[in-house]
Amino acid sequence: MCQNDNCPYYLNSKQLCENKQIDGLRTNSNRIKLRYTFRLFNFTYEDIKQNANDKFKFKSKIDLNNIHHSSYALGLMLSFYVNYGLSSRKTAQIMNEIFDIKVSHQTIMNYAEAAAARLNHLNENYKYNLSNTITGDETYIKVKGKTNYVFFFSDTSNKIITSYRIFPNRDTKCAIKALYQTFKKYETLPDKLDIITDGNPIYNASQVFYLLSGVKFNLYQVIGVKNNDDTSKLYRPFKQCEERLNRTYKFNYYGTNGYGSYTGANTYIVLFVAFHNFLRKHSSLKNKVPVSIQEIENEKLMPNKWCQLLKMASNY
């Protein structure tokens, strides 16, 4: 906020206020704006690119090619743990009591981390066929007992998740990083890229940041729960699809009882995105998966599909 008492903007606003012509000075919160305000970013586009994966780098000491169980058993574990949202303890119990495969819940966590470390490369580098309309939303989770936020962005028409970052805060920089994770999945950004979000002002600030960096996109914000404006009426179906994605993730998240570390949180969300994009059938896509890969489609059983997905991920 400009503090110069001789600022022309301030002097003009003050004069209007004295003349009781304040309607044009009211803000959305119904306060009176007298001084010129501006936004100053203390980071650059290059900073965002270089630090895009902070708190998202994890490596596993487990080599999935040398584990003590068969690849099919690994596929079973991932199916129960990810597809059906069971906790690692319940998954271990099923493996022990139903399939007579002795495994601890910690072993399942180790296998999951190793699988996520491999699948993350696939999620990030696969050449998706994306539309020019992306929808974003946030949902909260608990990491180490504290509230954190998952920023989901997805191509709601094709049901492809493009961004899935976890942040301890919900601010402009987090929104910018989440958007960057989506932008880098395009080989070339569309000339007309539409981003749909809620009314959170962090997205307005993100649009300004990217515009200053030479990246242009149209921002359409769906306000509230009622269609009181044309934009909300037109784009609410996209926003509702993103909210359903949040609910689907939260249904699986509840089975984990929260996460004890960022590594655990990132492990699960990487596996969830891989399942959602490559393995999960969607009724809106006529019971097809968002990204169809013939080698995976040839497999009938889900454990084998996981094995094929992990095999393909090795190439990335």
Image (cartoon, rainbow, N blue to C red):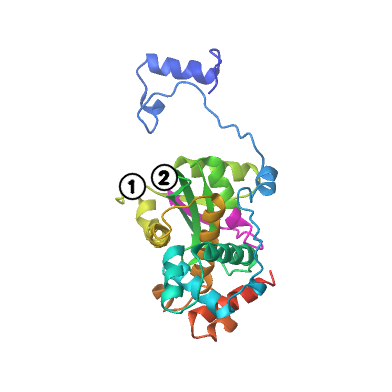
Q: Residue at x 50, y 18 (%)?
A: 10
- According to the picture, the residue beneath numbered tag 2 turns out to be 199
User: How many numbered marks are there?
Assistant: 2
Residue toward you, 217 or 90:
90
Point out the stretch of residues depicted in magenta: 181-198
Dot 2 or dot 1: first in sequence order is 2
How busy is the neighbourhood of tag 1: few (under 14 within 10 Å), some, or many (20 plus)? few
Give the residue type at disc 2.
Answer: Gly
Name the quarter where the C terminus is drawn.
bottom right
Q: Residue at x 64, y 66 (%)?
A: 118
Q: Which labelled disc corresponds to residue 3? A: none
* Image location (x, y in percent) of residue 49: 67, 49
Q: Is residue 188 inside the magenta stretch?
A: yes
- According to the picture, the residue beneath numbered tag 1 turns out to be 224
Q: Residue at x 60, y 58 (%)?
A: 191
Secondary structure under badge 1?
A: loop
Disc 2 + disc 1, Cβ < 8 Å? yes
